[in-house]
Amino acid sequence: MSLIIEEKFKNANIRLTPQRAVIVETLAESTDHPDADAIYRRALKKDNSVSVATTYRTLSLLEEAGILRKLNMQDGKARFEIEREDHNHLVDKENGRIHEFKNAELNNLIAKIAGEMGYDIVNARVEVVGKKRGDTECGCIQINVY
Ligand SMILES: [Zn+2]
């Protein structure tokens, strides 16, 4: 369990039970933006006392506390990731894989648009759905989870 995550539990006043720790660790180790069922299956391998109900409850508790982020993807599926540095997602239309990207120019453009509308940005996420051209490597970045 990373100190940063422990600190976040403390700040949010959430008791760090062994099951919650396993669930958040599982998510922190996952680079694929898993859905709740995938998180449950992975967590269960580490600790057989984790239940489906605990997984769902923990995910919503941690989302409220800002420890993780629920992504409501355009395909209607909810995926999860540890809340961290802002980044955007490019979803592969064929296999559903979610790639992460950052772009300063895009951020500036979003800030400009919001500013012209009289807003300061609190947070911005762009979700792009794409169809891969050929078989090349995507060259995407994976933003570190602590
Ligand atoms: Zn992400």
Image: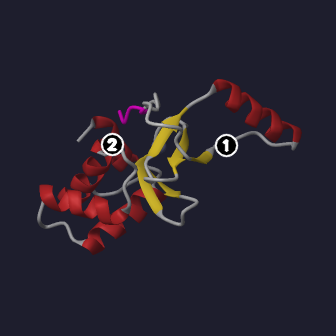
Q: Element at badge 2? A: helix
Question: Residue 135 colored magenta?
Answer: no
Q: Are marks 1 and 2 in contact (CB under 8 Å)?
A: no
Q: Give the left or right position of residue 102, taking residue 62 as reference.
A: right
Q: Which mark is residue 122?
A: 1
Image quarter of residue 57: bottom left
Q: Which mark is residue 109?
A: none
Front-most of residues 60 and 43? 43
Q: What residue is at 34 percent from the left and 57 percent from the top? A: 14
Question: What residue sits right under mark 2 in the picture?
Answer: 5
Mark pair 1, 2: CA separation: 22 Å
Question: Residue 145 colored magenta?
Answer: yes
Q: Is residue 38 visible?
A: yes
Residues in magenta, as a range: 142-146
Image quarter of residue 16: bottom left
Q: Residue furthest bottom?
A: 53
Circle 1: residue type: Val
Circle 2: residue type: Ile
Give residue 7's position: percent from left, percent from top.
34, 41
The residue carrying pointer 1 sits among few (fewer than 14), some (14 to 19) or many (20 or more) residues within 10 Å by Cα, namely: few
Q: Is residue 17 visible?
A: no
Q: What residue is at 43 percent from the left and 32 percent from the top? A: 143
Q: How many marks?
A: 2
The residue carrying pointer 2 sits among few (fewer than 14), some (14 to 19) or many (20 or more) residues within 10 Å by Cα, namely: some
